Amino acid sequence: MAQNWSSYVNTKFYGLDGEYKDNTEEVKFKGGRVIRYLINSHPKKVHQVSLRCKDKGTEKKDGKTEFEWLLYWYENIAKSGTEPIYLTDIVTGIGTKRYYIKLKNWRGQRFKEVGLEIEEI
């Protein structure tokens, strides 16, 4: 079952880089001939985005900063990216889609710049 995004963390993603997930499979014959097949009829997209979260020296909600809530949500609700989540469509901004989230990296002190990989399901 898909989970919702944390209510304590914003969804103001920026710096979108996107690409299609590989959707082909090859069969190679001894004679050198190669045939490619589609794996799925609908290709999936993978997005690399950034997210700015408040951290050290900022207001806490229920005892945690926004960045601490993101880590808590990722580890305990999204189960380190193994649970699908509902988000507004990253490309169109209209409607809701299911995605897998992978928290890639973060940097900064007062504000964290968090790198995320968002994969369509």
Image: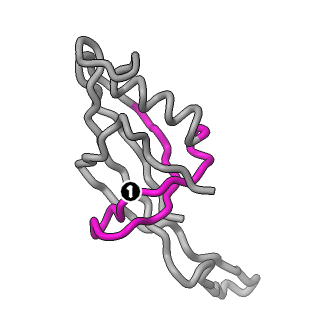
Image coords of residue 66 (percent x, y): 34, 27
- In the displayed image of the protein, which residue is found farthest to the front? 62
Q: Quadrant of the C terminus?
A: bottom right
Residue 85 magenta: yes
Q: Position of residue 109 (x, y in %)?
A: 27, 16
Above or below, 7 against 107 in this view is below
Which amino acid, mark 1? Answer: His
Q: As rendered, which of 100 and 47 lies closer to the eye?
A: 100
Q: State the image coordinates of residue 24 (x, y, percent, origin top left).
A: 58, 76
Q: Position of residue 18 (x, y in %)?
A: 34, 60
Residue ID at (55%, 74%): 23
Q: Is residue 4 left or right of residue 91?
A: right
Q: What are the residue bounds of the magenta stretch?
A: 79-105
Disc 1: CA contacts within 10 A as few (<14), some (14-19) or many (>=20)? many
Q: Secondary structure at mark 1?
A: strand
Residue to which mark 1 is pinned: 47
**Quarter of the image where the N terminus is located:** bottom right
| Left-right relation of 48 to 2 | left
